[in-house]
Image (cartoon, rainbow, N blue to C red):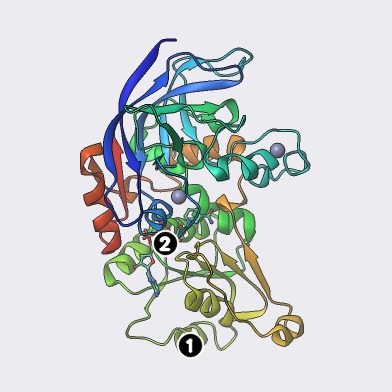
């Protein structure tokens, strides 16, 4: 069997740097799979949750990374609708197309994705990458985009316009779809809604521009960093709140004449900010939890108020997206300047600089750092 050797950033233990190692992958995909040559991969806070040990149960060794774009290098038997040379954005919820979630239009909840991609293996339960010492190497979310090659179920690769630059389109593979989708799909924001976004990182800024895309009447952004809030203004926020110096509840009351917001998106993953998002809702409002918390975290809400005021606390996985439909449309929105992906890319690095990229994320620097291959 011919194999391809490549460099990958491998997670071997929490709170230790990723190791950039030579690994190998078969050159020929099995039936129903595709081999993708990655061109770009974003660094997402979900990878950082793993690196700092906030999420248990991640097998080792694992190639991290789940926000990628590249070119189809080879297709396996039975793959009739994707060609070598197609430009693709990868989805970390590949779907089977047949389970009750897929057929009801909710592919991000697919049985196969929940069983396999969520456990960092392929649809047959196996791995595809081998270390120099012959170990099986897992691929994060079934993708493992911190390496130049990835073998994926056909449905994990979504073809997009070939004129889109890879660094920008890679971000559609997580932050853009998650943030815009939380507003457009999960919350189904209408132009009459006031939207609050708490946390203005890669996901939150996209929630802000999602609210702008659908014409939300008032967009409010909250963060602890003035720099992030400045960026939020550029992405469409009308009002910004620095919660280290201002009281969120008071400012929201002031901005909304005491009513509260119809939609609040939490894009950090902290119990206090999830409770804060829920706490500033107008009657009938919905709080969307896009941020992902460390293992074991709980939040507390008042269920009497919930029923009395018809409040909703809703989880949003991957922006409740349908990647086959949403990825090409989001890339199209970018190419037609309806959304901004250029300003999201605040750093382009080589794979060998990846640990520095995560250090910067820990300190809240930049929006998205992208590895270019
Ligand atoms: N639901 C999903 O499908 C999904 C997908 C991708 C990422 N995520 C999660 O979304 C979260 C955000 O990811 P990201 O890549 O945008 O992270 P990021 O590190 O880029 O951004 C986090 C932002 O939150 C701000 N922040 C931190 N603490 C705060 C506080 N107490 N109050 C206000 N603001 C605060 C930071 O200044 C920063 O701007 C993570 O938990 C990530 O795991 C969820
Ligand atoms: Zn992500
Ligand atoms: Zn399915």
Residue at point 51%, 52% (across, down): 178
Of label 2 and label 1, which has the lower sequence position?
2
Residue at point 55%, 64% (across, down): 216
Work out whether 61 lies above or below 84.
below
Taking 291 as reference, is 239 left or right? left
* Separation (CA) of disc 2 from disc 1: 20 Å
Residue at point 46%, 56% (across, down): 209
Label for residue 254?
1
* Along the viewing direction, whichever of 155 and 346 lies nearer the viewer: 155
* Along the viewing direction, whichever of 221 and 243 lies nearer the viewer: 243
> Which residue, given by chain and number where applicable, does mark 2 sit on?
236
Farthest residue, direction top: 1
Location of ligand 1 given as a quarter of the image: bottom left
Residue 329, quarter of the rendered image: top right
Label for residue 333?
none
Would residue 149 be visible to someone looking at this image? no
Residue 260, quarter of the rendered image: bottom right
Q: Secondary structure at mark 1?
A: helix
Q: Position of residue 339 (x, y in %)?
A: 44, 48
Q: Quadrant of the N terminus?
A: top left
Work out whether 265 lies above or below 339.
below
Residue at point 48%, 88% (across, down): 254
Q: Secondary structure at mark 2?
A: loop
Tag 2 near tag 1, CB within 8 Å: no
Q: Quadrant of the C terminus?
A: top left
Q: Position of residue 277 (x, y in %)?
A: 54, 76
Q: For mark 1, does the 10 Å Cα neighbourhood hold few (<14), some (14 to 19), or many (20 or more) residues?
A: few
Taking 191 as reference, is 292 left or right? left
Taking 276 as reference, is 359 left or right? left
């Amino acid at each position: 069997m011919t194999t391809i050797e490549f460099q990958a950033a491998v997670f071997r233990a929490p709170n230790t740097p990723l190791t950039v190692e030579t690994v190998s992958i078969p050159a020929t995909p099995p039936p129903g799979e595709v081999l993708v040559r990655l061109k770009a991969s974003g660094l997402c806070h979900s990878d950082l949750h793993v690196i700092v040990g906030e999420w248990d149960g991640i097998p080792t060794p694992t190639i991290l990374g789940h926000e990628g774009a590249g070119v189809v290098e080879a297709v396996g038997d039975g793959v009739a609708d994707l060609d070598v040379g197609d430009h693709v954005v990868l989805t970390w919820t590949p779907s089977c197309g047949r389970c009750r979630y897929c057929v009801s239009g909710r592919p991000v909840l697919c049985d196969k994705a929940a069983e396999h991609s969520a456990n960092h293996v392929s649809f047959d339960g196996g791995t595809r990458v081998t270390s120099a010492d012959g170990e099986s190497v897992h691929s994060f979310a079934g993708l493992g985009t911190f390496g130049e090659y990835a073998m994926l179920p056909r449905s994990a690769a979504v073809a997009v316009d070939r004129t889109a630059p890879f660094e920008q389109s890679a971000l559609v593979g997580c932050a853009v779809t998650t943030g815009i989708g939380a507003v457009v799909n999960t919350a189904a924001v209408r132009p009459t809604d006031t939207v609050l976004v708490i946390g203005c990182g890669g996901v939150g800024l996209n929630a802000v521009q999602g609210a702008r895309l659908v014409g939300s009447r008032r967009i409010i952004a909250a963060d602890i960093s003035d720099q992030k809030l400045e960026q939020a203004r550029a992405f469409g926020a009308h009002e910004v709140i620095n919660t280290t110096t201002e009281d969120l509840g008071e400012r929201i009351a002031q901005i909304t004449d005491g009513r509260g917001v119809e939609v609040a998106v939490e894009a950090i993953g902290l119990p206090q900010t999830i409770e804060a998002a829920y706490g500033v809702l107008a009657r009938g409002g919905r709080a969307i939890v896009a941020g992902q918390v460390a293992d074991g975290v709980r939040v507390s809400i008042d269920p009497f108020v919930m029923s009395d005021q018809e409040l909703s606390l809703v989880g949003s996985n991957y922006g409740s997206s349908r990647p086959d439909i949403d990825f090409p449309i989001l890339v199209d929105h970018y190419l037609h300047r309806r959304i901004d992906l250029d300003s999201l890319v605040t750093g382009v690095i080589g794979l060998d600089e990846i640990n520095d990229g995560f250090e910067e994320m820990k300190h809240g620097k930049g929006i998205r750092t992208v590895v270019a291959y």
